[in-house]
Image (tube, helix red, strand yellow):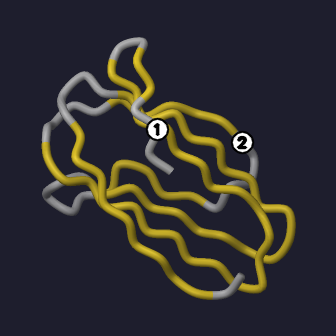
Amino acid sequence: MTGTDRFTMELRVGDTLAVQFETTKGSIYMEIKEPDESSLYAGNGKGVREFTVNILESGTYSIYVEAHHAKGTVYIQQMDGTKIRGNR
């Protein structure tokens, strides 16, 4: 894959994003931005493969993924308490 994608998610205070992010070939960069466009997470999928992000502000969050000759996985699940709402 080579290119850039942008996704948006409506999130509420108290939600959690469970992220699986792995780059196996080339490079993948991902950034999660808060409603005010400040960066909540930015990274290249190296060194950490699974993590969670706690949502402290309700609103529309943007997720940017940029890939260069890449193979890998970016999987995001939106969780509200124990319920998974299944965004991908």
Left or right placement of residue 26 versus residue 43 in this view: right
**Residue marked by disc 2:** 49
> Residue at position x 38%, y 28% from top?
16
Q: Quadrant of residue 53?
A: top left
Q: Disc 1 on helix, strand or loop? A: loop
Viewer-side residue, 20 vs 37: 20
Q: Residue furthest top?
A: 82
- Name the amino acid, label 2: Arg
Q: Disc 2 on helix, strand or loop? A: loop
Q: Residue furthest right?
A: 25
> Residue at position x 18%, y 28% from top?
13
- Measured as percent of width and height from the top left, residue 46 is found at 74, 54
> Residue at position x 35%, y 14% from top?
81
Against 48, residue 56 (above or below) is above
> Residue at position x 75%, y 46% from top?
47
**Residue marked by disc 1:** 86
Callout 1: 10 Å neighbours few (<14), some, many (20+)? few
Q: Quadrant of residue 74?
A: bottom right
- Name the amino acid, label 1: Gly
Quarter containing the N terminus? bottom right
Against 31, residue 28 (above or below) is below
The label number, if any, that marks residue 43 in the structure image: none
- Measured as percent of width and height from the top left, residue 5 is found at 47, 77
